[in-house]
Image (cartoon, grey):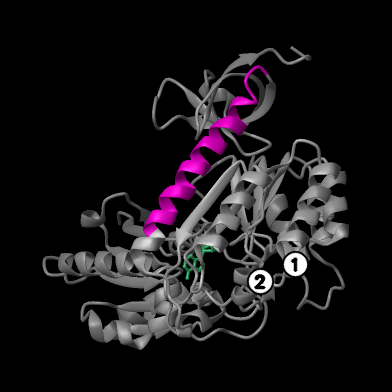
């Protein structure tokens, strides 16, 4: 019998991207193989995100589009996964009659069993309750052969006023360290060179485990795994950046010189209303220490524009902070009202046109900063991990520096997965071009 075809559409963060890899890993065991074409699929899963209203709408509109395919193909299994599924549960079934399956991210391990129920009983299945205990280890059908995502914890115990994550991903639950070490060891054996540890507040790892270890200890354990050359993680919360963690980052050779540290706003008044738990000056102290202890550390951040009550003066403080911290990359979003979050009930919502105008100003600043930061690297030699052929120019290859900068260069297929020395020849705001130089051993 030929393999059944699975199409997955993924919205949102790396956690969702990796969840999709886990869904397809489990379904591979059930005889499904991934396809890029929804029209030839036997099963379609939309893995949704509801961090902002737009992402939620996109998920729903795709689901509507895929539901139409069922008219010609009644046996097509149509499912919704991820944070919108978690939030809306049974309600989604009422909205889309053709839907067979609705499940949250903590129910992924049950996907094979849900599919069997659908096939046997010919009735839809909804599973959005968080099971007790730590997240389960499941196989993942990974797209990349060099860099692997490893989810180390789920959920978030912080309650930032803007954020839906505590309601969609539940309370913090860390995976046992032995399972994480085992997964990373298997990745190394399969030829993976780089891992990115994932979690909503990745550096609060371990708080709810009885193992008596924290994120810094986990980094030390993973640094010892043979074959892995680079370790990254995202996203840490500034309040969990302990001195011990900063020391560990400085000490461990495989932990890369790159940190995504969400600031959200440069105004103390806004940070307090957001419930972030730090002031600008505390954040500054931390980044100063990080910069001193880890030479060449590159920073990126998240900024929310137009949080309720944000004045012109508050926003100017954000622009000043972005310029002061000289981020290598800034990810910025207009504040989006999310039902059942504290900030949705705040009265002084910022008009959309004000958010748009501020967005443009931050965009201009970010682009010029990124270009400047990249241009400083011209003439330097960077260690680059070869990832594969460039999507833009198939004759070229791409890879990243330890500081997470994307580089285009000439290489060969058999060098994928190797670390090369590349001299940076030119730089734009989003990527670098470089020329390979012989390493000392060559
Ligand atoms: N509106 C806009 N941006 C948001 N983020 C989280 N919630 C919202 C919201 N309601 C942003 C934050 C977070 C990133 C993943 O998404 O900046 O760090």
Residue located at (56% from left, 37% from top): 369
Q: From what the image shows, is residue 197 above or below residue 400?
A: below
Q: Is residue 278 left or right of residue 334?
A: right
Q: Check disc 2 and report the residue beneath it.
A: 276
Disc number placed over residue 366 in the picture, else none: none
Quadrant in the rendering for residue 40? bottom left
Residue located at (59% from left, 61% from top): 265
Q: From what the image shows, is residue 308 above or below residue 138?
A: below
Judging depth in this view, the residue of 213 and 310 nearest the camera is: 310
Quadrant in the rendering for residue 399? top right
Judging depth in this view, the residue of 115 and 283 nearest the camera is: 283
Q: Are marks 2 and 1 in contact (CB under 8 Å)?
A: yes
Tell which residue pokes out farthest to the left in this image: 72
Give the image location of residue 284, x and y in percent.
Answer: 75, 54
Residue located at (38% from left, 84% from top): 89
User: Of the residues under marks 2 and 1, which one precedes in the sequence?
Assistant: 1
Q: Which residues are magenta?
A: 356-379
Give the image location of residue 427, x and y in percent.
Answer: 54, 25
Can residue 426 be found in the magenta stretch? no
| Label 1: which secondary element | helix
Q: Check disc 1 and report the residue beneath it.
A: 239
| Label 2: which secondary element | loop
> Is any atom of residue 228 visible in this view?
no
Judging depth in this view, the residue of 413 and 318 nearest the camera is: 318
Q: Is residue 345 left or right of residue 191?
A: left
Quadrant holding the N terminus: bottom left
Q: Which label lies toward us, 2 or 1?
A: 2
Question: Looking at the magenta stretch, what is its main secondary structure?
Answer: helix
Query: What is the count of numbered marks?
Result: 2
Judging depth in this view, the residue of 375 and 241 nearest the camera is: 375
> Is any atom of residue 145 visible in this view?
yes
């Amino acid at each position: 019998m030929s393999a059944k075809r699975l199409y997955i559409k993924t919205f949102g963060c790396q956690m969702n991207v990796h969840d999709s890899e886990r869904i397809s890993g489990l379904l591979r065991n059930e005889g499904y193989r991934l396809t890029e074409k929804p029209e030839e699929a036997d099963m379609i899963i939309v893995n949704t995100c509801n961090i902002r209203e737009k992402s939620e709408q996109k998920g729903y509109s795709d689901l509507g589009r895929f539901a139409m395919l069922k008219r010609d193909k009644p046996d097509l299994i149509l499912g919704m996964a991820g944070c919108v599924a978690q939030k809306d549960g049974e309600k989604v079934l009422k909205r889309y009659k053709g839907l067979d399956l609705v499940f949250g991210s903590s129910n992924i391990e049950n996907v094979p069993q849900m599919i069997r129920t659908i096939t046997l009983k010919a009735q839809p299945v909804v599973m959005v309750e968080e099971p007790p205990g730590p997240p389960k280890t499941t196989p993942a059908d990974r797209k990349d052969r060099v860099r692997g995502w490893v989810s180390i914890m789920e959920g978030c115990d912080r309650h930032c006023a803007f954020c839906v994550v505590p309601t969609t991903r539940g309370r913090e639950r860390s995976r046992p360290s032995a399972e994480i070490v085992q997964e990373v060891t298997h990745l190394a054996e399969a030829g993976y060179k780089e891992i990115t540890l994932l979690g909503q507040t990745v550096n609060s790892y371990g708080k709810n485990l009885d193992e008596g270890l924290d994120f810094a200890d986990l980094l030390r354990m993973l640094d010892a795994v043979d074959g892995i050359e680079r370790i990254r993680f995202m996203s840490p919360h500034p309040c969990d950046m302990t001195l011990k963690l900063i020391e560990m980052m400085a000490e461990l050779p495989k932990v890369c010189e790159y940190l995504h540290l969400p600031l959200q706003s440069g105004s103390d008044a806004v940070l307090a209303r957001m419930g972030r738990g730090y002031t600008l000056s505390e954040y500054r102290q931390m980044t100063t220490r990080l910069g001193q202890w880890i030479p060449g550390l590159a920073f990126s951040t998240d900024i929310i524009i137009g949080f309720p009550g944000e004045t012109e003066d508050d926003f100017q403080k954000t622009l000043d902070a972005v310029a002061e911290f000289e981020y290598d990359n800034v990810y910025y979003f207009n504040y989006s009202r999310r039902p059942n979050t504290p900030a949705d009930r705040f009265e002084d919502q910022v008009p959309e046109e004000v958010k748009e105008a501020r967005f443009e100003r931050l965009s201009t600043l970010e682009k010029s900063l990124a270009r400047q930061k990249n241009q400083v690297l011209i003439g330097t030699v960077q260690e680059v991990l070869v990832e594969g052929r460039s999507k833009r120019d198939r004759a070229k290859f791409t890879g990243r520096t330890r500081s997470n900068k994307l580089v285009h260069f000439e290489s060969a297929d058999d060098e994928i997965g190797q670390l090369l020395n590349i001299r940076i020849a030119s730089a734009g705001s989003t990527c670098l071009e470089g020329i390979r130089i012989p390493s000392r051993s060559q």
